[in-house]
Amino acid sequence: MHRGKGMKFVGDSRIPATGRKPNIPKDYSEYPGKTEAFWPNFLLKEWMVGAVFLVGYLCLTVAHPSPLERIADPTDTAYIPLPDWYFLFLYQLLKYTYASGPYNIIGALVIPGLAFGALLLAPFIDRGPERRPAKRPFAVGFMLLALSGIVYLTWQSAAHHDWEASKKQGAIIEGAEFDKESEGYQLLDANGCISCHGAELTGGAAAPSLVDTGLTPEEIANIAVKGRGGMPAGMFKGSDEELEKLAEFVSSLTAK
């Protein structure tokens, strides 16, 4: 070593460093009750809590069954479907002028896509370390705007819906067993009766049920020709023989 050159140290990565501790978890024995084994202690508790909630949910389902409506009838054009409560805001949105009709794509895809896209991007745009809402105006503003919009549209949909008519439309009515290939049913279909009374002839919002009418064939034939209530006269266009067959068929319909 020459004077003035100083001293140089050379390290070799092949030589293990001394004093390095093994990679083992810390000892928490001095904190009793603060930690436990993941398997099986922690998982067993999680499964027990989940089982309690599952049994409670099943009991609630048995005690309060789902409010089912009658079988869906595509021929009942008067029926107004209503989505579940968590989709009511989208249902209400599609009622407005620039979100329905020719602008249906805007209400169904564009507006919901922009709204949910903004919520998804909010955490990536506002990446500040602050946790107080006052320090996170961008994310909090988007969330409050979305929440207020959903609450308002849901309230509007529920407040302006005719719940009594909806209950009547969806009421389960006992149907009748009949052959849809029979001549009487084909005559009903040919004269447009199916579009109001439904494919199962249980009626709808625009027409009553044809099952268990309690009317004689003569009375049914008279209604088919002269009409009654919301049914106009002259609906039946067939012959007298066909009218007689139609009236006998309707008169014979009884609930299962």
Image (tube, rainbow, N blue to C red):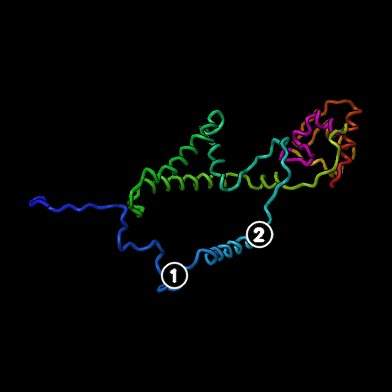
Q: Quickly name the residue at label 1.
A: 34
Q: Nearer the viewer, mark 1 or mark 2?
A: 1
Q: Residue furthest front?
A: 1
Q: Position of residue 44 (x, y in %)?
A: 56, 65
Q: Is residue 239 left or right of residue 47?
A: right
Q: Is residue 184 above or below residue 153?
A: above
- Looking at the rendered structure, the kind of residue marked 1 is Lys
Q: Quickly name the residue at label 2.
A: 58
- Looking at the rendered structure, the kind of residue marked 2 is Leu
Q: Is residue 21 above or below residue 85?
A: below
Magenta segment: 184-206
Q: What residue do we see at 84% from left, 46% from top?
A: 255
| Element class at badge 1 | loop
Q: Position of residue 229 (x, y in %)?
A: 76, 37
Q: Quadrant of residue 216?
A: top right
Q: What residue do we see at 52% from left, 65% from top?
A: 42
Q: What residue do we see at 80% from left, 31% from top?
A: 189
Q: Position of residue 245 (x, y in %)?
A: 90, 32
Q: Earlier in the sequence, mark 1 or mark 2?
A: 1
Of 231 and 68, the residue lying toward us: 68
Q: What residue do we see at 32% from left, 53% from top?
A: 14
Q: Is residue 181 left or right of residue 167?
A: right
Of 44 and 223, the residue lying toward us: 44
| In magenta segment, residue 205 | yes
Q: Is residue 24 above or below residue 98?
A: below
Q: Quadrant of residue 183?
A: top right
| In magenta segment, residue 220 | no
Q: Specify few, some or many for label 2: CA neighbours under 10 Å numbering under 14, 14-19, or 20 or more.
A: few
Q: Is residue 57 above or below residue 160?
A: below
